[in-house]
Image: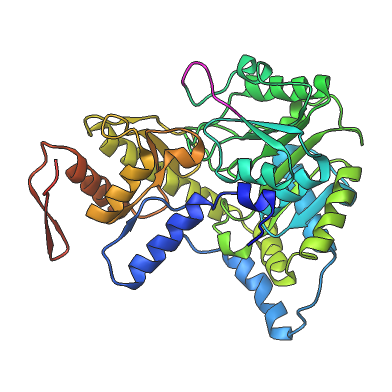
Amino acid sequence: MSISLIGRAIKESGTLRINEIASILRAKGEPLIHLGGGEPKSKAPIDAITNVSGLLNSGEIRYTPADGTIPMKQAIIRYTEEFYNRKVEPENVIASSGAKQAIMVALQAILDPQDEVLFPTPYWVSYPEMVKLCGAVPVAVKPEDGSFYPRMQDIEQNVSSYTKAIIINSPNNPTGAMYSEEFISNIVKYCEKKGIYLIMDDIYHRLIFDGKKPISCYDYASDLTDNSKLIVINGVSKQYAMTGFRIGWAVANKKVIEVMATIQGHQTSGPSVVTQKAAIGAINGIQSHVESLRLTLENNRNIMMERLNAFDGVVPTKPDGTFYTFVDFSHYSKDSLELANFLLEKVRVVTVPGVEFGLEGFLRLSTCGSVKDITEGIERIKWALDPNSPNELYIGERKLVRDWV
């Protein structure tokens, strides 16, 4: 069978594969604890549900413009002004079927084959594959100091004459690291100076802890004209717990948005009118839902860190935001895929191997679930790995006996 070069180069999404395995095991009645999830368990805001119910009752479910409906664009404009202090025009905005599609279409709009796209390590699993889908070259930049916080010298050392764009995801998936105001300021100014596109993946920007405030990249940009190469990505999936609605957006200069809309029009046409209506309700509605989720995630983060800090041999780094912790398990295994499979097989705990994010020896653990999931999940992992743990463990009425070293 003949498969394209791009088709052969693309890997399956590790996080989606993990979720599929988890769904199959749950359907079989297995006592699974999912610490690999990337979606909050809270319900969508009532304003989103109310806003969409009238449309559903009308039965008028029709095509939408390729770049989104006028009310959807108005909601994004309002959001950008409120949370970024930046007033934009409808021509600067595109709504997509999720922030993932917004990033993908943005890359297709700006990249040529062999162009390079930089992003710090650890990175979201889809960045390298999305770049490859454009025939371009992903360049993962690993901070030399071994931390989860890149420095400008790390970026600058990897920029070449082929560098077309840099992607910054802060707070970061998988680490939860929120990059400093100084770094965001410097990267914005550096990209302006070099004429490099800067894609700010801000999907977690309001889910931050310890009194930190969201950082607006626009505060440091000197060029906000139609020559600007700043592209800001956001969406409703994370902060509004609306992962299944699949609405994200991009804000950029008018020419880039125009090209993105043309590409998207041929790819999928416009996003669903149903999900846009729900997203409008969430954005324009009462925002206490976001704060409630943020507080829950911060509390879950604290509980997760407390359990991990009492776990000999693991090295956790306290996340600044998101709903992930990226934990160094290399004391137990430097093969993260093997370790994740081991934990799934032996104690039915789902984790995501660090190799999917560009770093071996780590596992990504999620704080999306309940406190019970977090505490019991870490207890099971500790029992499976720590040789000083008791020889037996009960999961419900099932007794497990450790028959491995």
Q: Which residues are magenta?
A: 140-146
User: What residue do we see at 82% from left, 45% from top?
Assistant: 109
| Residue 258 on image: x %, y % | 89, 50
Is 247 above or below relative to 121? below
> In this view of the protein, which residue sits in the foreground, 60 or 157?
157
Residue 152 sits in quarter: top right
User: Can residue 383 be seen in the rendering of this structure?
Assistant: yes
Residue 353 magenta: no
User: What residue do we see at 73% from left, 38% from top?
Assistant: 136
Q: Residue furthest front?
A: 1
Q: Quadrant of the C terminus?
A: top left
Q: Quadrant of the N terminus?
A: bottom right
Q: Is residue 259 left or right of residue 308?
A: right
| Residue 275 on image: x %, y % | 68, 67
User: What residue do we see at 52% from left, 17% from top?
Assistant: 144
User: Can residue 366 be seen in the rendering of this structure?
Assistant: no
Is 67 above or below relative to 203? below
| Residue 141 on image: x %, y % | 59, 26
Residue 251 sits in quarter: top right
Q: Is residue 306 left or right of residue 175?
A: left
Residue 53 sits in quarter: bottom right
